Amino acid sequence: MNPTFSPLVDSFGRLHQSLRISVTDACNIRCRYCMPEQVAGFLPQHRLMSFEHVARVVDALARSSIRKLRITGGEPLMRPRLPNLVSLLRSIPQIEKIAITTNGMMLADCANDLVDAGLTHINISLDTLSEETFRRLTRREGVDRVIAGIDAAIQTKAAIRLNALVMRDINLEDCVPLVEFALNRGLVLRFIEFMPLDADRLWSRQQVVTGSELRERLSKRFGPMHLVERSDSSQPSTDYRFEGHAGTVGFIDPVSKPFCDQCDRLRLTADGKFRNCLFGKEEWDVRSLCEENASCEQIVALALQSVRAKYASHGISDSQFKQPERAMYQIGG
Ligand code: SAM
Ligand code: SF4
């Protein structure tokens, strides 16, 4: 019988059940809210956590309280042989959900393999339907590839969701077409507020379009919106349905309405560090533990150390707030 360990509970009583696993910091596009135009270099292969080590960490944490996984990056589909990782994670019995967040550019080619390997949820980032805006926002071409990726994902048995981020000066006008696109395909779309995690450090409150501003815009086009009751208290999104339309639209408002009191997430960076928050200042090196062939107990002890050092909230609105050194693509979104 495998031993079980105490749950990952922080000093504010928050139980941690979700692990975000970044598998690379590399990406094939350059979203302004995340990456710089020119990247000095991505992590070399030898500094990435191997799939075996990731699975070892998950196996240990699953004996504690981790039940839900999200694979992210950088762009996770750029990591070769990703279905192999999904298969390894799938074989860990306590794990109930294996999700991915992707920009969709490479999804059409691998959605089936990933779902066959055990992926249960696919979130695809889609901020615009216009090629011109896509180019301004991501400094690359190819919104048609993202849409092909979404359509391929819909054909699988995974649950699909769309994520959109609105920057006031770039894609505010896209919010209505994006909702129409999602409603037409029967997909849930969630808007996420722009957080101060961009590599260029150009974030400003003026660029943030809050959920309430978006709701006001959307209700002008689609009519009254009604709050949908939360099915999961740790879900970061507040969902609404439109009168007379099937489908819902969600709002993740970390800037205007922080939901840190419900946070149940721990993060594993692509180079093998635990982080207890996107905005955390400290990291805990689990990769070295894996290399030293540490026991599950030692891995869980390190995760507990990280979780117990977690602050009550991200502090974006505090006067002494400082943007973290690592940008979103380096932490894992
Ligand atoms: N490359 C994949 C993608 O874009 O979906 C996965 C990694 S990306 C960092 C994960 C999510 O973080 C995306 O939905 C993206 O929109 C979001 N994101 C990136 N930078 C952000 C920022 N500064 N504020 C809020 N969300 C951000
Ligand atoms: Fe790449 Fe995702 Fe960051 Fe965009 S948000 S640059 S797709 S990692």
Image: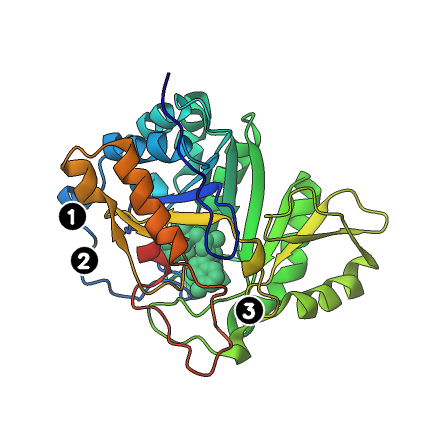
The residue at 19%/51% (across/down) is 43
Mark 2 lies on residue: 41
Left or right of 117 on screen, residue 298: left
Looking at the figure, which quarter contains the N terminus? top left
143 sits left or right of 228 in the view? left
Choose between 267 and 48: the one closer to the eye.
267
Q: Earlier in the sequence, mark 3 or mark 2?
A: 2
Q: Residue at point 63% right, 61% down?
A: 175
- The kind of secondary structure element at disc 2 is loop
Side of 11 where 232 appears, left or right: right
Residue 233 visible in the displayed image: yes
Q: Residue 173: x, y in percent?
A: 62, 67
> Disc 2, disc 1: CB below 8 Å?
yes
Q: Quadrant of ligand 2?
A: bottom left
Can you identify the residue that label 1 sits on? 44
Q: Amino acid at mark 1?
A: Pro
| Disc 2 CB within 8 Å of nearest ligand 2 atom | no
User: In this rendering, is residue 213 above or below 31?
Assistant: below
Residue on which disc 3 sits: 255
Residue 300 drawn above or below residue 258: above
Q: CA distance from mark 2 to mark 1?
A: 8 Å
Q: CA distance from mark 3 to mark 2?
A: 30 Å
* Callout 3–callout 2 Cβ contact below 8 Å: no
The residue located at (40%, 24%) in the rendering is: 92
> Does residue 64 sit above or below 125 in this rendering?
above
- Residue 58 is drawn in which quadrant? top left
Q: Position of residue 208 (x, y in %)?
A: 55, 72
Identify which amino acid the numbered label 2 is placed on: Gly
Quadrant in which residue 91 is drawn: top left
Disc 2 packing (10 Å; few <14; some 14–19; many ≥20): few
Going by the picture, which residue comes out furthest to the top? 1
Q: Mark 3 or mark 2: which is in front?
A: 3
